[in-house]
Amino acid sequence: MSTGSAPHPKRWIPTYIVLLASLLILAAALALQYLRTGSDSYLVSAAFVAVIAVYTAWSFARLITLKVTPRSLMTLLKCPSCGHEVVRRYREGDMLFSELDACPKCGSKMVAEGIFLKEEKH
Amino acid sequence: MNGDTTTNMLLLIIALFALLFLMQELQIYRIITEVENYLGIIRAARERALHAAKEQVRKYSKSLDPEYVSRRIDKLIETRIIAPTSLDPFGIVRKLKHVLSVGERTLESEVASLAPAASPYEVQNLVVLVDIARSLNEVYKLLNHYYLVARRFKSLWLLMQLSAAMPFIIEEVRAVEGAVEAFRRSIPIGDSAGPLVAAFLMRKYGVQYLVEPVKDTIVAKLAYSGKDIYVVKGKGPGGNTGHYDDAVAWVVQRTKPAVIITVDAALRYEGEVSGEVVHGFGVAIGGTGVEKYGIEEIATKHSIPLYAVLIKMTEVEALSAMTEEVYRGVKEGVTVVEELLASLPDGSSAIVVGVGNTVGVPP
């Protein structure tokens, strides 16, 4: 289960890469034209494109450093006999305080003590 | 000054005015686009919630025509609760309670008639799903109204107010939408923290007897040595909040409690930690204030101290499936309540009220 319905912001990464590469190529081409012709209009255009490229790079850097921690729905099972605890992924139909899986230590039925969203560790 | 200069000056002034006008038009257009985008998000959230409610109700609607069920739910989400007049505020809480209970009962019976195959607790979850769709529909319609008015009159100030408020409204809409999945699966949400503390106490100490003196609200007397401890919570595991004031009144008619402890979820500020447990004095119950008023009245009449145990969380956490941090807060909340009960003299009695939606938390 996800924590929200908002689309993941990192889906924009390919768009940013293409945009940034295009701007850098354009800025370089304009700078080259200025060096060849000495026309000030190329210099102004190159500077303008470079400013946009810097802004795009800054936005891109902010996006890739954005930390999104996915969470999964987990069920905490506790054995009433030996107290052993197991946290496993939630399964459809899990209900709080119901007897679910067998205890891996003593074989008794384990009870669902909690159902919660837990951060996924990579 | 020659003619050319004068013409240039005039052209410059005209261009300046044109630019000023154009800038304002551009700003209006930019804000309109921004507000439209936000409205699109809210509309989509409403559609998703409505679709989820219809799908769930249809699961239990047996042989009823799906089109009929869909039309009925469309009608249900348009219903309104009309607050009583405050021209004469005397007795307004009683009137509000009456209006709310009529609305609650009617919605529940309507949903039950559309889902004859659903168990009572499943009906409660369906009612909450319809209620979520109803509140999102109300928010969308209200904002859409302001947007259309602002657009009609091209009012920059109205649009700016809408645009400024939208990020906060979106946050709330996402929080409400997050509840859909939890109610569909019948799992505890953050707001279930209070009932979960109550349920853990009942399981830990055992229950001498359990009664339902008020609809959807249970009172359990714990098998607690030397003290009479009464735990009040919504019935569960269906999504309801119970009627705590009536249940507390029922207990107070039978015993004189030394203290009433309310355990509830509390909104945490930015910079605070989710799941943090804090103490408070007074009645920790949100919502319309009807039940809060009722318990305050009883406590004041009988001079009963009011303690509160608050479990901090964000609004999104309160309405979405319970997070691990909040769950840890629940465990800590149980310890805090136990400490409060242990400090009471032997032979005394106390009421612990687990406040919040009891979805996914059985008695």
Image (cartoon, coloured by chain):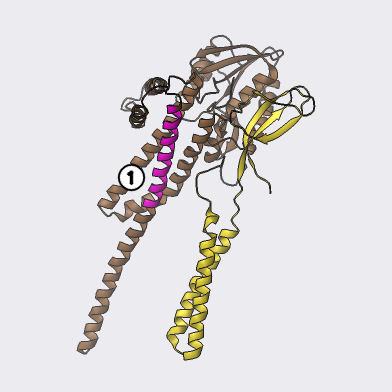
Chain colours: A yellow, B brown
- Image-quadrant location for residue B275: top right
Nearest the viewer among B126 and B219 is B126
Q: Position of residue B14 (x, y in %)?
A: 24, 74
Nearest the viewer among A89 and B41 is A89
- Image-quadrant location for residue B89: top left
Whether residue B205 is visible here, answered yes or no, is yes
In the image, farthest residue toward the top: B254
Reply above or below: B287 against A25. Answer: above
| Label 1 element class | helix
**Residue B43 belongs to the span the image colors magenta:** yes
Main SS type for the magenta part? helix
Q: Residue at x 52, y 64 (%)?
A: A16
Q: Position of residue B48 (x, y in %)?
A: 43, 39
Query: Dot 1, crowdedness within 10 Å: few (<14), some or many (≥20)?
Result: some
Q: Amino acid at mark 1?
A: Asn
Count of labels in the image: 1
Q: Viewed as shown, does residue B13 lie left or right of B263?
A: left
Q: Residue at x 62, y 17 (%)?
A: B350
Q: Which residue is mark 1?
A: B144
Specify the segment rendered in magenta: B36-58
